[in-house]
Image: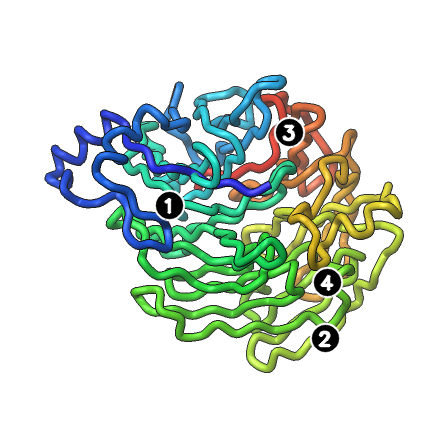
Amino acid sequence: MKANLLSCLSLLSISLLFALGLADRPAWAGAAVGQTSSATQAGASAQSKIEVESWTKPEAGWLYVLDAKPDAGGPGGRVWLVEPEAGKVMGSIRTGGNTDFALSPDGSRLYVASITQGDSSELAAIDTARGVAVQRSSVDDREVGNVLPSFSTMAVSGDGLALRILRDTPKSAEADAFLLATFDAQSGEFSQRTVHLGNCGPGRFISYPTKDQFDILCPRSNRIRLIRVDGESRELQNEDIKLPWERRVGAALAVEVPDNQEIAIVRGDGGVFKMNLVTHEFTDTVTRPVLPNRVPPAAWPSSPDGSRAYVGYNKDYAKHYDNRFYLDYGRSPNLRPNDALAGEFRVFDMLTWRKVGTIKTKMPFWSAVIANDGKMLYAMAPQKHSILVIDTVKMREVRELKVGGAPALALVAP
C-alpha cells in the first residue's frame, strides 16, 4: 500500500507567516512535489491530521517514539515524547496514517509526515522547544508500506539544511519510479528538482553528511547508489553499484565505517561484507552467514563513537518467509512481515566485524536506537506495547517501558 499527504496550514501558522511578512510566499514549490493553489492552502487547516496535543521541552536523551497503532482499531498514529529514565510520557503528537518522522541534527526540528487522503501526505515541521508546528507542507506519492515501519524513508542532512523524502511514482502497474523530494529547512519550501533512484524500492539512507551528498541502499534493484548534487539538487553524480549476491539474500543493514572509505553491509543471512567507496570492490569479513538465522531489515544502531554495531537476529526463521524478507521484482514493497521479529542482539566490533557479545531479551523486538552516550539501547517491541531498555556495558536487559499501542521506531533527542 502506498499513500501520500496533502498540504495543511493551521490558523496559528498563518498568523506566524503574516507576522514574519511571508504570507505571500507559496508553501510548495515545483510539480515534482505537487503544486497547490492559494484556495487549497487556505482550506488545508481543516484537513490537517498532525496536531501537537501536549508538550514539554525535551531534554537530551529523551525519545521520540513512533506509534503506528495507538488506539485499538482506530485510524492514524501518534508520536510520543518519552523520558526513558522514569518511563514517563512528556508529550504527544496525533497524526494520520502511515506516519514517518525525522529529526534535525541539533534537535530543534522534528519533521512528521502522515497521510491526509489518497496518495497525499502532510509534512509538519515541529519546533521541539515549544511544541508548535512552524511549517506545514504537502507531498504527493510518499513511499509508505502496509506493514509496521522498521526504518524511516526520510532523513535530514548532517548539516541540517535539507530533508529528503522518498517518493514512489509508478510508471505503470509493473514498474515504479522512485524519487527523492527535497525540503529546504531554511526556506520551508520543496525544491522543484528531484533525485532519481530508478526502481530502487523502499530505500534507506546509508549516509547523509551534507545537503549535497548522500548514499542510498536500494533493496529492489539490489544496489547501492552514491549521489552528489549541487545547491539546486541537480545531479552531479548518481552512480549505482550492484551487490555481488542474489537479490533474495538481501541487505539488512548498510553503514559507513567511521574514518574509513568503506561501507559495511550485513546481509539477510548474517554474512558481513565491505565495499570500498573508491574502487567499489567488495571484500568479505570474518562474519559468515548464519542460516537458518536471519537478520530482519531494520534501523539497527551503532554506538556513537562508531566502534560497535548492534544487530537484531531472528532465530525462529521460517522457510516460508524467504521471499518476504527481501524483495523480488513484481512483489509488493513489504520487506518484512509484522511477525518477523528479532530475538537477540549480536554485538560486533565495526573495525574487524568480529562478534564481541550477544544480548538476549525477554521478548522479541522490531527495531532499536542507542542513547547519546552509548550506554543504553532501546528496543521497540510493538506486539507487547513496550520498549526494552538494555545496558550495553553489562549486555543485558534492565527494564521495560510500557509505551502506546505499537511502538515501532524511535529517535533520540541530542
Q: Is residue 24 left or right of residue 52?
A: left
323 is higher (above) or lower (below) than 353: above
Residue under the point 30% across and 54% down? 30
16 is higher (above) or lower (below) than 198: above
Direction bottom: furthest residue: 279
In contact (CB < 8 Å): disc 4 and disc 2: no
Label 1: how many Cα within 10 Å (few below 14, some 14–19, many 20+): few
Find disc 2 in the rendering and name its residue. Answer: 283
SS class of the residue under badge 2? strand
Looking at numbered disc 2 in the image, what kind of residue is underneath it? Thr
Of mark 4 and mark 1, the one earlier in the sequence is 1
The label number, if any, that marks residue 10 in the structure image: none
Colouring: rainbow
SS class of the residue under badge 1? loop
Q: Is residue 254 left or right of residue 134?
A: right
- Residue 249 place in picture, x, y as percent: 78, 60
**Which is closer to the viewer, label 4 or label 2?**
2
Residue under the point 88% across and 47% down? 319
Of mark 3 and mark 1, the one earlier in the sequence is 1
**Which is closer to the viewer, label 1 or label 2?**
2
288 is higher (above) or lower (below) than 186: below
Which quadrant would residue 318 be assigned to in this image? top right
Report the Cα–Cα distance between label 3 and label 2: 36 Å
In which quadrant of the rendered image does the N terminus lie?
top right
In contact (CB < 8 Å): disc 3 and disc 1: no
Of mark 3 and mark 4, the one earlier in the sequence is 4
The label number, if any, that marks residue 387 in the structure image: 3
The label number, if any, that marks residue 353 in the structure image: 4
Report the Cα–Cα distance between label 3 and label 1: 24 Å
SS class of the residue under badge 4? loop
Find disc 1 in the rendering and name its residue. Answer: 106
